[in-house]
Every structure is written in C-alpha cells, then in structure tokens.
Amino acid sequence: MFDNVEEAIAYIESKRSKRTIDEFRKTLNKCHIHMRQKNMIHIAGTNGKGSTVNYLRSILNAHEYHVGTFTSPYLICHNDRIRIDDAPISDEDLLFYINKYYDVIEEDGLSMFEIDVLIMLAYFQDEDLDYRIIETGIGGLHDKTNVIDPIISAITNIGMDHQKQLGDSIYDIINEKMGIIKPNQLFITSEKQGTILARLQEQCDAMGAMMCVVPEYQVSHYPFHFRYRDMEFELKNQGIYQVDNARLALTIASKLFRLNPEVTIPAIENASWKGRYETLPYKDTTVDIDGAHNVPGIVALIQTLEVKEEENVSIIFSCLKDKDINPMLDILLEEGYEVYLTPFDDERVIDVENVEDREHLIKVGNFKEALRAAYFKKNHIVITGSLHFISTVRKYLVDLEKEKK
C-alpha cells in the first residue's frame, strides 16, 4: 500500500515479470474488471497508433462524446497513458486504484504494462464513458490489451520492429498484429502494401470480419492538404505521416456516426500529439522532435523533411539496445544528414561506442553537447529515435524555456 503517487509509480515501473495473456485474463476476472465495456475501439500497428488514437479522441470530443484513451509509452508522466477527454488520470485516482488492487498485483506478479491495463480498465469501468479507445503495447495477438472485446479493431500499418518479441520475418509480425481482429467485427486499416492487405483480408474472411481499407492519399506540398469525403483539411507543424493517421481516425469515426464538418475539421487541424514532429524552442531558434524509432518511422521522417525542403539538417539520435540501429543510421547518413549519436539515462540504452564509425556520424557524450554543437553550426536540428529518448530531451527543452520566463 502506498501513501503517495511517487512511490506508487516507482513500484509500477519496477515490475518486469512476464506472464501470458490467459494468466492476465484470470487476474482481471478475479478482480471483477470487465473486459467487455461500452464502445471499445482497439488500435494496433507499427507506427502511428498514438496519433490515430488522439485524432479519433479529438473528433469524438468535438461531437460531445465522453472518451477514455489508453496509450503507451508516456512522454511526460506515467499518468499520461490513461486519459479521459485528453486529461490524464489524476494522482489521487491512480493512487486509489493501485492500492485497491495491490494485493492481487503482488499475489499474481503483474508486470508494469499489465498493471497499467488493469488500472485503465477498472478506471474506465467506473466512469460513464461513450467510447474507450485502446492502443496496443507491442504486437496484437499476445498483447495484454487484447483481452478486450471491441466494436472496431484497426491497424495503422505493419513494418519491421520489435523483432525480438514478435518474430524475425514480416509474416511473423503480420500474424501477431492481426491477432486483434475479432469474429464478426469491423476491421479498418490504412496499410498500403498489397501482400500485407491480402493477408489481413484472408484473416478477416476466416474470422467472418468485414475489412475496410482507407484509400491512399498522396501529399507532396507543405502545409499538408488532404480531403476526406466532402471535407478539406490542412495540417501544419506535423509530419507528413499524420495524413494517413488522420484519415484512419476519420474513417473509424465515420463508421460510428455522421460527421459534422464544422466541428470535425478543427478537431483534426488543431489536434497535436506530443513528440511526433513537435516543434520546441531552443535558445533563439527551434528544434523538431519526432519519435522515429524504427526504419518505417525514419523513412517517414525523411519524407517530411524533404517535403518541407529543410536544409542543413543535423539529426540527434539515440535508441534502446533492443533495436537494430544500423539500418536506421544508414538511411539517415545516405540522405546526407549529419547525425549525432548519443546515449541517455536509461539502463536499456544502446552502447554508443560499439556502433561502427561512419562518415558524418558523430558520437557525443550526451544530447546537451549534441544540441550545442548543432546549434553552433546553425543547422536545422531534429531530435529523433526512442520515445524514451525524446521524452528526456523534451523535458530538458521545456524546462529550459521555463527558466527564461
């Protein structure tokens, strides 16, 4: 039992056990926590899950619906993972639920992610919500969020990432991600690759589910203009990849109710998701931070930089040791960018010194040193890589700006 939320969060984040989804289901049943709640929507994918959740939440809120969301990892504080109408769960509520279920958490040996999912489901069960939008952690079939019974499941896209957990081939990853598809359900995807779509359709046919594919939309100029049905949108200060995520969210929402353009357009245009091509001040200039933590994410980031015609770009990059860093570095360096490779304060961080030396790859002791060096060269600075890394850098930049005031 805990007296303050700081102790409770430290306890949650210390739990690293591995259990099966069936074991987790038994724990939820023991706690009388419902896995089938009103209007659940489940979102998986390699990239863009959190952004899609946020766009969909914004649309639903604009139509005056009360919405719970679950995303991970957090960018600012642990509470961010569990939100209602974009407000994080309060310290008081988080403390209440961790204490309420502490005995069973200890008895069953739950992991951090299981504790978060348990608290989220208990919290949403106690609230009068119209919709509950839940993002998977990693994968789909064996992900602990896959205990839910949603009305709609969606996959943003599927690419190579988390191979150690999901499998070495793209087919292993497809099979894991599509595990969220439920019998006789509506399934929606913004995936574009024909072979992947064919496999998803095959699974939908086997499950008796109806598959809806969001049509591809080409964007080549900044700001990013796109249409959805009779509505026109303009996205500024966002990555080009957000067009796909916004259109997926619009498609999901359109299956739930009739969209009102007067509130839908500003809901999309004004929605922002921290850490996804977010611009922040630094000294007398700005830097962009973007959580491109895998090859598809790096490719999408480069597309954004090219369409925005950014020149003299310096990339500050770091990731965790479970990532295959070499393909990501190779892509960035082949584009001619200067890349600063740095560690950060995390026990799982990549060992920078073990990374092969390359032309235009600069190894530095910390991100603050990299920021100063790139700033001195008057280059356009982009900070990317692990979401844990950009969270650390983002906090530093925000705190630095507060000190000026």
Image (cartoon, rainbow, N blue to C red):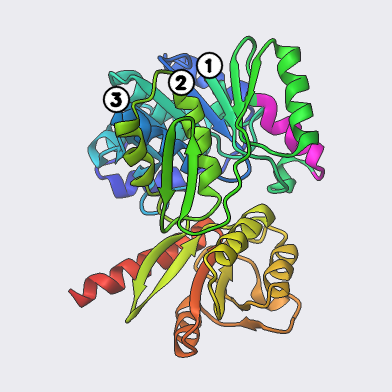
Label 3 vs label 1, nearer the camera: 3
Q: Which of marks 2 and 3 is nearer the N terminus?
A: 2
Cβ–Cβ below 8 Å for labels 2 and 1? yes
Q: Is residue 218 left or right of residue 108?
A: right
Cβ–Cβ below 8 Å for labels 2 and 3? no
Q: Residue at x 45, y 67 (%)?
A: 288
Residue 149 - label: 1
Picture quadrant where residue 142 is located: top right
Q: Which quadrant, please, contains the C terminus? A: bottom left
Residue 107 location in percent, x, y? 49, 28
The Cα atoms of the two marked residues, 3 and 1, are separated by: 19 Å
Q: What stretch is highlighted in magenta?
A: 168-179
Residue 312 location in percent, x, y? 55, 81
Q: Which quadrant, please, contains the N terminus? A: top left
The Cα atoms of the two marked residues, 2 and 3, are separated by: 12 Å
- Per the image, label 2 sits on a secondary structure element best described as strand
Given residues 34 and 185, the one toward you in this image is 185
Q: Residue at x 51, y 81 (%)?
A: 370
Check the image and name the residue furthest to the left. 405
How many neighbours does mark 1 have within 10 angstroms: few (below 14), some (14-19), or many (20 or more)? many
Residue 66 - label: 3
The answer, for residue 56, to whether it is visible in the render is yes
The rendered magenta stretch, by its main secondary structure, is classed as: helix
Type of the residue with mark 1:
Asp
Type of the residue with mark 2:
Met
Q: Is residue 242 left or right of residue 235?
A: right
In the displayed structure, 102 sits above or below 353; it is above
Q: Which of marks 3 and 1 is nearer the N terminus?
A: 3
Mark 2 sits on what residue?
40
- Per the image, label 3 sits on a secondary structure element best described as loop
